[in-house]
Amino acid sequence: MKKNICVWLGLMLIFGLFVPATQIYAAMGGLLNGKEGYYTTWPGQYDSRATDNDLQTSADIYAGSILEWGSSPVTITSYKSFLTEGRARLTFYNGLRQFLYSEEIERTSAIQTVHLQVPVRNVVYIHIENIDPNLNAARLYEFDVFGALTQPPIEDLAATAEDRKVTLSWSTPSVTEATYAYIKRSKIPDGPYVHIGTSTSNSYEDRTVTNGTTYYYVVTYIMEGRESERSNEVSVVPKISPPQNLQARGNDAEGTISLDWVSVTGATYYKVKRSVYEEGPYITVAKSVYGTTYTDSKVDSNTPYYYVVTATNDLGQESAYSNEASAQVGGTTSTGALLTIYLLGGQIKEYELSEAELSAFLAWYDAKDAGVGPAKYKFTKTWNQGPFAMRSEYVIFDKILTFDVDEYDR
């Protein structure tokens, strides 16, 4: 039986005692918050004990009886309940008392939240019926429903991926005073979505993802017990990030090339890869580098080398390449060359190159002639540069008929 709190407080004050009442407000904020329901089978009987946010009180729905609430037409997306005894069924009807949806309320040892697979629209009557075959009372300590808002949804949901982690961020529309947000995820565009978490801020970290899998996210927010329409959908593939800001420096005195880069979250070790021409293909020169620096001592003088680095996590999953960085040992050479290339169609190209630049071009040509490497070679123009920061010219391997090299002392 529901105890009259005011009477008890009066008795405690008479005896000079003060004992704080214990209330748990786990179901606050719903559409039925504090509202009285009525028993359709007992005219004139009303009950608010299931919606008073007090876990010490319960509405006992006896065999053959129905507790019901009426409202303006709403869209219901979820409900909270705390049923400890008996059996009860929840049913929604529209304003004409036409059936919309029904399911049995699960008995639990604590308040539970149930998210409906499909929102139920135009609900006017919310109806809980005792269906216990043994005629036991259905003891309902808490119950409330939550519905869709008319306020605008979140429109700027964004996602970033890292190694086995997705971070979501958004801005709640300024016209709202949202209490919290529901995070929903799917592996299929446009759902169906599964509720995976709740956030009381404008961000959320999902650490229950698998690298290489595409995930689709939406977010809704709760205000005054109602759930907004879903946000824009974002998709993301978690994976280990590539190293950033790779830099290479030639050390003439030691005859080595030094590399360094920014560490990657989740990386266990790094692989260093090298090529003698720009954009690869690369060969691995160090398989297990546990820091963010590496010194390459197996280099030839006056030969440009091009490097990339990858990160590997504890599952052995490897990232994409870092940015490419190049360096050489020996710096300026004492000889130069005039490279003349004869192309299909009668076009002739001339390039004035250092010894190292010529070596790089010849290495690319020989490799491509053997079927390995990129189809084009880039020359960086240092003449007629005009207002541009850099000008590049590409030569296509299949367009080259022949070329001449005229070397000279600088």
Image (cartoon, rainbow, N blue to C red):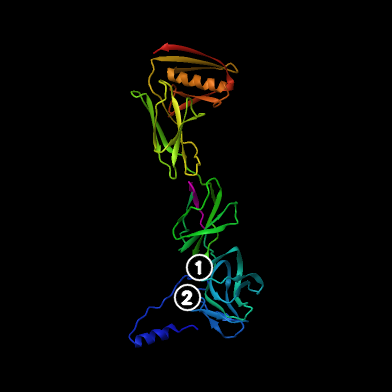
Give the x, y percent position of residue 285.
46, 30
The residue type indicated by label 1 comes to Gly
Q: Secondary structure at mark 1?
A: loop
Q: Nearer the viewer, mark 2 or mark 1?
A: 2
Q: Which mark is residue 175?
A: none
Give the x, y percent position of residue 228.
53, 62
Residue 295, relative to residue 19: is it above or below?
Answer: above
Q: Say which residue label 2 marks.
A: 55
Q: Residue at x 57, y 72 (%)?
A: 72
Q: Residue at x 45, y 18 (%)?
A: 353
Q: Nearer the viewer, residue 141 or 269?
A: 269
Q: Which of disc 1 and disc 2 is earlier in sequence? A: 2
Residue 316, relative to residue 30: is it above or below?
Answer: above
Give the x, y percent position of residue 57.
48, 79
The residue type indicated by label 2 comes to Leu
Residue 150 position by quadrant = bottom right
Q: How many labels were placed on the picture? A: 2
Q: Residue at x 48, y 36 (%)?
A: 321
Q: Is residue 176 visible to us here?
A: no
Structural crowding at the residue carrying mark 1, measured as other residues with C-alpha within 10 Å and reported as few (<14), some (14–19) or many (≥20): many
Q: CA distance from mark 2 to mark 1?
A: 19 Å
Read off the magenta span: 153-164
Residue 375 position by quadrant = top right
Q: Is residue 30 visible to us here?
A: yes
Q: Nearer the viewer, residue 310 or 286?
A: 286
Q: Say which residue label 1 marks.
A: 225
Q: Secondary structure at mark 2?
A: loop
Residue 335 magenta-drawn?
no
Structural crowding at the residue carrying mark 2, measured as other residues with C-alpha within 10 Å and reported as few (<14), some (14–19) or many (≥20): many
Give the x, y percent position of residue 236.
53, 48
Name the quarter where the C terminus is drawn: top left
